[in-house]
Image (tube, rainbow, N blue to C red):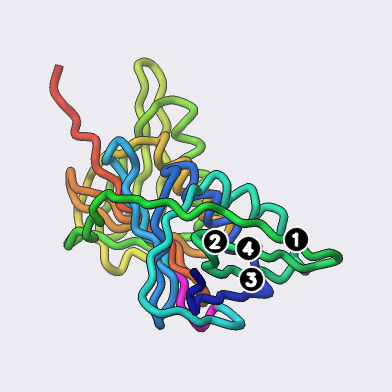
Amino acid sequence: MYSDMLLKTEQPKMLSEVIGIISELVTEVKLKLNKDGLTIIAVDPANVAMIIFKVPASAFSQFEAGEETIGINLEILRAVLKICTAGSSLIMKNEDGFLKIEIVDKIKREFMLSILDLESKDKPIPELEFATRIEMNSLDFAAAIEDCAIVSDSCGFEAEPTNFFIFAKGPINSAKLSYSSDEIDLSSAIKSKSRYSIEYLMKMTKAAKITDKAIINFSTDYPLKLEFKNQNIELGFILAPRIETED
């Protein structure tokens, strides 16, 4: 059975990089398509993190799709998309129960990926209100998480109206990075403090390579929402907090 779906892009590397990032958190997803674009909303198996990925129809050189959902194994999709180079054209079609992928550069490659029947219920994006919203250079943010990983498996975010701190404390070692409103956008920051898993943050901050800015939304002992956006994609993550307990 054929569908009317046809997605084409001459810039497949961005899509390849994002699928690679998402595949570190989940192995199977539903690609949801409608006239507005492509969306992935998924929750990791531990129910700790949600991924929200959106590509508008305008980001593709050709986009034809009705209301359609395609279940796919991300490891296989990632491996196929990694073949794409800066000069490749990528075409995706829904054909005979397969996701047909054509990669055209010096030669033409065709892959038929089995479409999965994923019966899990779709989880809605939670409605969250944050006390603090910070914008900073995405690579600086990723580097801060790597610094904290040296001493602990979790790190804390603390905001004040004029300062932002990223810190970590292990059994005997600690790290702290301080930022003022001179370096980052603290225009929507009020006093907040929360702690999150570095393992998850390390995976999420790989998105720093796709956009210049990281948007950090959090409140005290509250989920974190990270956003990485450019003119063609939106990649967001919601991460549950790690609540400190007294020994």
Instruction: Rate crowding at label 1 as few (under 14), some (14 to 19) or many (20 or more) other CA atoms within 10 Å.
Output: few
User: Where does the magenta region start and end?
Assistant: 55-59
Question: Disc 1 and disc 3: Cα gap in Å?
Answer: 10 Å
Residue linked to disc 2: 99
Asked if disc 4 and disc 2 are in contact, CB closer than 8 Å, the reply is yes
Question: Disc 4 and disc 1: Cα gap in Å?
Answer: 8 Å
Q: Residue 221: horizontal and vertical position, in percent?
A: 18, 43
Q: Secondary structure at mark 3?
A: strand
Which quadrant is the C terminus positioned in? top left
Question: Disc 4 and disc 2: Cα gap in Å?
Answer: 6 Å
Q: Is residue 201 left or right of residue 126?
A: right
Q: Residue at x 46, y 77 (%)?
A: 56
Q: Quadrant of residue 8?
A: bottom right
Asked if disc 2 and disc 1 are in contact, CB closer than 8 Å, the reply is no
Q: Residue 132: horizontal and vertical position, in percent?
A: 24, 59
* Label 2 vs 3, first from the N-terminus: 3
Q: Residue at x 21, y 60 (%)?
A: 124
Q: Would residue 181 be visible to someone looking at this image?
A: no
Instruction: Rate crowding at label 3 as few (under 14), some (14 to 19) or many (20 or more) other CA atoms within 10 Å.
Output: many
Residue linked to disc 1: 109
Q: Residue 184: horizontal and vertical position, in percent?
A: 42, 62
Q: Residue at x 72, y 54 (%)?
A: 83
